[in-house]
Amino acid sequence: MIDFKEIIAKSIKEVLENQNNENLNQSQISLNDLKGYIEKPNNKENGDYAFPTFRLAKSLKKSPQIIANDIKETIKIENDKIEKMEVVGGYLNFFVNKKLLTKEVLKEINLKQEKYGESEEGKGKNIIVEYSSPNIAKEFHIGHLRTTLIGSALYNIYKYLGYNTIGINHLGDYGTQFGKMIEGYKRWGDEYNIEENPIEELTKIYIRINDLCKQDEKVLEQCRENFKKLEDGDEYCTKLWEKFRALSLKEFNKTYDLLGVKFDSLKGEAFYADKTKEVIDLLEKQGKLIESEGAKIVDLSEKGMPPCIICKSNGSSIYATRDLAAILYRARTYDFDKCIYVVAYEQNLYFKQIFEVAKYLGLDKKYTDGLTHVAYGMTRLATGRMSTREGNVIKVNELLNEAIKKVLDIINEKNPSLEEKEENAKKIGIGAVVFSNLCTTNIKDQIFDWNTVLNFNGETGPYIQYIYVRTKSVLEKAGKTPKLENVDLNLLNDEASQEVIKNLYEFNQTLQSVVEKNEPSILARYLIELAKSFSNFYNENKIICDDKELQEARVFLTYATGIVLKTGAKLLGIEMPDKM
Ligand code: ARG
């Protein structure tokens, strides 16, 4: 599809090259740089694209305004592509040819359908996205929900842009706490129904054995022994651990199923337990390991960070060592260009540390450069029932089911005759939770409040779904969607239609920004803008009208909008209901 930014950047580059100005070292300003400078004005009066000339003022020894004027006078750009240029201050503003834009966008959507916006720009690049990674025998909490959703959305979008994408669930299935769990289960296992309610019951056992350990040093010793046995592959301990793991996974899978989230690889920390020796050897060889109070550490004081513990005094591996082993494994197995960790910002320092230590493992710089921590903020609940239960742990499964139930109640009240109520309530309820987790910038803390999340008129998942359903019902009323070649696109030149078209045009660029910044909220915001612009178009223009030619053009735009809303929502992990 036509790339206006590229066209503008190329033409500006030509102008600059013809300046013959030795101060302006051409190699300094690449086409990509120029493309990057081009802005989208907030105010429509300033056109569709603006080129700020401030950056060139120094090397050209002219004022930005004069430069803007000079470029305007000398630029060669076909007026079938750019309709008009205007200088405002130090900006050169470009107005794209609306007819061309309209034709290009609708042609492309018509051609690609639900693959519109897909590209091959990531071809040949391997991207690992690690997300979710809950801890077995512990609650899957609301923080895990956010990594699951951010990670899964990133996974979908990278894939859509042609990257070879690998989704990994780095399950927390290892650590000394399993020595305790085993001991507790050995003592009181039959008092608890862990098959029925694994996480809750195992948590109870864990709390109880912990208490006992505090009272009785001997019990603690037994727990340590259990963990040692587990590390050495003892049959009884391993069997129990496997059971805890399988039961926990069964629970987690309920959540993943509700959310429609998948992984390519489920390799937990345990997988790396026997691979930590190599990490220790490598660091030792590099002379980076220091003994400190019996433990082995890597000193990071030069980097202004506390030391990274690699090996405890009893020789056991720890969380960090297993992560370092995972980096080695992933580099070798996937030859990754990027390895993205979607993990809460509480672990910011931790990731800085292990990314630093990873540089001592003798890996190619490509890999250590590719390590990326995508940090996200906390979710707090607005006061309410869910926030006070059981020591503040919100059970994600309950939250999701509650969302579905609340939507079902709304449907029963407002539209009791709706078809496939249950199915729709699920799409809407889950969609609402997903969207609320993705619409704020990753790093920001968020407050989860049912009233906001389920507001059909707010900036929410249900709002986007509602607008989508509206496109569907327009199409239904219109009867048949016209063939593009029979549509007179010139009839879509009003402002409201043009706003929708511009938004549709920006879909692929939006996805590119998402992967540039690892920020799915950019897509979430985009969908809100697209939905709002459609809503405005719908209110301003009668779609089903007496002028059949006009109707066909508007119906076609409606159809195209529906496709893009649905595709975008799907990338975020939100399904569209057909009716609402
Ligand atoms: N299991 C950890 C937690 O729940 C998150 C794991 C993050 N990933 C990693 N490679 N360390 O806090």
Image (cartoon, grey):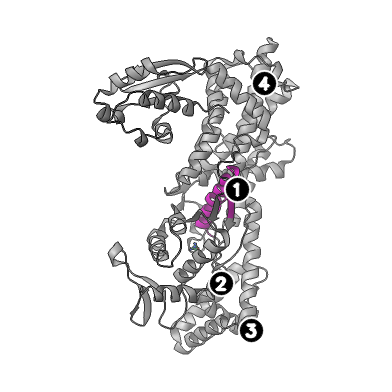
Does 402 appear above or below 90?
below
Q: Give residue 186's position: percent from left, percent from top.
A: 60, 83
Kindly identify the residue that appears in the image at 62 percent across and 56 percent down. Answer: 263
Label 3 and label 4: CA atoms lie apart by 67 Å
Q: Which residue is mark 2?
A: 270
The span picked out in magenta is 141-166
Confirm or reject: label 2 Cβ below 8 Å from ligand 1. Answer: no
Tell me, yes or no, whether the highlighted magenta stretch contains residue 417: no
Residue 317 can be seen in this image: yes
Q: Residue beneath label 4, please?
A: 555
x, y (%) of residue 152? 57, 50
Question: Could you tell me how far apart the alpha carbons at marks 1 and 2 are, in whole angstroms?
Answer: 34 Å
For label 3, the residue is 236
Q: Which residue is mark 1?
A: 403
Q: Secondary structure at mark 3?
A: helix
The residue carrying pointer 4 sits among few (fewer than 14), some (14 to 19) or many (20 or more) residues within 10 Å by Cα, namely many
Q: Amino acid at mark 2?
A: Ala
Q: 29 or 328: which is nearer to us?
A: 29
Are the residues flagged by discs 4 and 2 in contact, CB closer than 8 Å? no
Q: Quadrant of the N terminus?
A: top right
Q: Are marks 1 and 3 in contact (CB under 8 Å)?
A: no
Label 4 to label 2, Cα distance in Å? Answer: 56 Å
Please tell me whether mark 3 or mark 2 is closer to you in this view: 2
For label 1, the SS is helix
Q: Could you classify mark 1 by the number of other residues whose Cα lies within 10 Å: few (under 14), some (14-19), or many (20 or more)? A: many
Secondary structure category for the residue under label 4: helix
Disc 4 marks which amino acid? Val
- Position of residue 95 relative to residue 447, above or below, is above
Q: Report the mark closest to the observer, 1 or 4.
A: 4
Q: Residues within 10 Å of mark 2 (few under 14, many from 20)?
A: some
Label 3 close to label 2 by CB (< 8 Å): no
Query: Which amino acid does the dot numbered 3 rest on?
Result: Tyr
